[in-house]
Image (cartoon, rainbow, N blue to C red):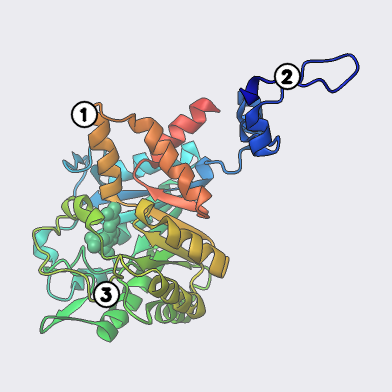
Amino acid sequence: MIWTLARTRTETSVMDKTHLVDEITGHRRMRRNRKADWTRRLVQENRLTVDDLIWPIFIVPGTGIVDPIAAMPGVNRMSIDKAVEAVKEAAGLGIPAIATFPDIEMELRDETGSNSLVANNLINQATSAIKKAVSNIGIITDVALDPFTSHGHDGILRDGIIVNDETVDQIVRAAVMQADAGADIIAPSEMMDGRIGAIRRGLDAAGHQDVGIMSYATKFSSGFYGPYREAINTSGLLKGDKNSYYISPANGTEAVRDAALDVEEGADMLMVKPGIAYLDICWRIKEAFGLPVFAYQVSGEYTQIKAAAMNGWIDGDRIMMETLLCFKRAGCDGILSYFAVDVAKKLAKNG
Ligand code: PBG
């Protein structure tokens, strides 16, 4: 029994406690650095802080409305007055930015999403109200047409095709109006070719040199968006799928190339969406471009965690924190998450 064999090395014949494992590992032991809380803290490579969080919220018309979204337990659609209160709280917790999505009346939705070009539409009203009432929080707005179209697609639909260039012309105009209303960052999620460069030119021509662009650079055609489509009531409208403009989940190199074009066109920040199933893409585009990279932990990811936690099958809080930390490890500078306020509160408590 070699591993219990004691050998004498010194004259004083101290028992040599070298174990077979020491011989196998060459005396290296990974667990030494993990042995106590203090050393684990000392060697921790990544940390999640409140500064990493972007909070997506849903806006509805009216006043005094806080309307729970069935498929996203804990998430509400809010009228502007209520959203202002909620965003005040978020800013108080130190959350650096919000991302707004409108759920507009069905009567206002049409083939081309024309309500996106109404200067005081719901999303722009929300921006100016929040800007007026809350300081020190960034407002990120999307210019995709899906909340405004009668078919739920992100662009203009003509003869069964989502037309690229006409859509770009429209979203540039919408982006300028969003900036006029006070948006700090435009985040186009509709994946049309050439949109980043076109929006940059449009913003600059209108004097909005300081308004940034966070490109939804790699947006995949994903089943994880289901609950969001319920939240803004597009799931019943959507005809077909978005495969002709979103990236296939099978393609990583294509995603990097798409992001490269956005970088060339002037994106200030890049986003990967969905998040947890696409950490390889986060890592690749962070390594490739060195721009700030954000992951969007989308509605389906949120709902999976919530639903399992509500059934008592997983520890929801623990997995919420774990997933967000893993985005940091994967190279992300921040995360858009419906958990943002919960996380900010938890971080503040743990201080
Ligand atoms: C569409 C859009 C989507 C999301 C935000 N804007 C995807 C879609 O409906 O196809 C998804 C957000 C989420 O799932 O949390 N422009």
Quick one: SS at disc 2? loop
Q: Looking at the image, is mark 2 or mark 1 nearer the viewer?
A: 2
Q: Which residue was labeled with disc 3? A: 245
| Contact, mark 3 vs mark 1 (Cβ under 8 Å) | no
The mark that comes first in sequence, 2 or 1, is 2
Which disc number belongs to residue 311?
1
Residue 38 lies left or right of residue 116; in this view the side is right
Q: Mark 2 belongs to which amino acid?
A: Ala
Residue 285 lies left or right of residue 56; in this view the side is right
Other residues around mark 1 within 10 Å, as few (<14) / some (14–19) / many (≥20): few
Residue 88 visible at all: no
Q: Residue at x 67, y 32 (%)?
A: 22
Other residues around mark 2 within 10 Å, as few (<14) / some (14–19) / many (≥20): some
> Which quadrant, please, contains the C terminus?
top right
- The image quarter containing residue 244 is bottom left
The mark that comes first in sequence, 2 or 3, is 2
Q: Mark 3 belongs to which amino acid?
A: Tyr
Q: Mark 1 belongs to which amino acid?
A: Asn
Q: Which residue was labeled with disc 2? A: 6
Q: Position of residue 211 (x, y in %)?
A: 48, 67
Q: Nearer the viewer, residue 328 or 216?
A: 328
Q: Nearer the viewer, residue 19 or 204?
A: 19
Q: Give ligand 1's quarter of the image.
A: bottom left
Q: Looking at the image, is mark 3 or mark 1 nearer the viewer?
A: 1
Q: Position of residue 7 (x, y in %)?
A: 77, 21
In the depicted structure, whether residue 349 falls above or below residue 332: above
Which disc number belongs to residue 67?
none
